[in-house]
Image (tube, rainbow, N blue to C red):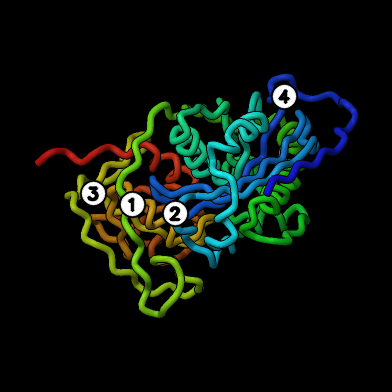
Amino acid sequence: MLEDHTTAASPATEWPTAYPQGYAVVDVETTGLARDDRIISAAVYRLDARGEVEDHWYTLVNPERDPGPVWIHGLTSDVLEGAPLFQDIAEEFSARLADRVLVAHNAVFDWQMIAREYARAGREAPVRQRLCTIVLSKELGLPLPNHKLESLAAHFGVVQQRAHHALDDARVLAEAFRPSLRTAAARGVRLPLHECRPLTEWTDRAAVPRQQPSYGGGYGSYRPTSWRPARKRPACPYPNPGRYEEGGRLKQGMRIAFSGDTSIERDLLEDRAVEAGLHVATSISRLTSLLVTNDPDSGTSKVVKARQFGTPVVDEAAFGQLLGDVEPASPQ
């Protein structure tokens, strides 16, 4: 289940001294986006200071539960049954991450999943900084139609072979990150590095079985279709505390709406919002607390209404960071 390949690094060239000395480009596939979801595969491409590939590594991981949206990642229970547990690969994973900046597409998500797995295993991930390629592409002003990995890959002429396969996604990101890094260095752009604070304790909550959809098969509410029918969700148990304030925290009960393409499947992103105690709204009104969109200049009805009502707007990467620290609802 483990793969390890090494390639020679390019000759040393002059490079900004303020930039990191090495990167770990990471992709993880998971059973979902909720707090108690698990990693089912992981890949790491180690890069030197200039973005040249040093080696890569890949493993399956037995999540000890159902694999979630198989139609996305293609990993069934049968495939994962004989895979190592996370605690069995944690040391090797650490060796790949140590002393490097973790690079990922929507890095908040990958980092949180990794940190939770290490906490479950009673360990601490050796990561102190992360870099999100979505944020970097914005800093560079790349003319992308959306913020999906496939769009970043197409911009740099990188060919995807197996989308949503951790090893290929990590390869694609590594190949797209290299020219991004060099462009940033040439322009003197400060890299958008963020601190990573590892979890030190973990308590698993009781797992809630996913109900099978009426159309048969599948995994819970994850549906393999681009057409998204309305999903009946339980009512949010918390009152709406009002609008999100820039620089502040999300609060349980806030009404969150989404518009446009997201790098993560929309259903999974919405599920994570609900798991955090937020109310996912299908439309914009004066009561909407926040609109999440990667294209705030688009003319979609939600964006237009958000402007009319003065609804705060953030992108997917920023929303992912906010989800990591949602303020509990005030006691009634």
Label ID, residue 65: 2
Give the secondary structure at mark 3.
Answer: loop
Question: Callout 2, which amino acid?
Answer: Arg
Residue found farthest to the left:
332
Tag 3–tag 1 contact (CB < 8 Å): no
Marks 4 and 2, how far apart at CA: 38 Å
Q: CA distance from mark 2 to mark 1?
A: 9 Å
Mark 4 falls on what kind of element?
Answer: loop
Q: Secondary structure at mark 2?
A: loop
Point 78% across, 56% down: residue: 157
Q: Which of the two residues, 127 or 177, is positioned nearer the viewer here?
A: 127
Instruction: Please provide percent x and percent y for residue 248.
Output: 33, 35
Residue identifier under label 4: 21
Residue 197, image x, y percentages: 47, 27
In this orientation, which residue lies closer to the viewer: 275 or 321? 275
Which label's residue is closer to the chain start, 3 or 2? 2
Question: Residue shown at 45%/54% (left/top)?
Answer: 32
One can see residue 191 in this view: no
Q: Residue at x 34, y 67 (%)?
A: 211
* Dot 4 or dot 2, earlier in sequence: 4
Q: Are marks 2 and 1 in contact (CB under 8 Å)?
A: yes
For residue 65, side relative to residue 97 (left or right)? left
Q: Which mark is residue 109?
A: none
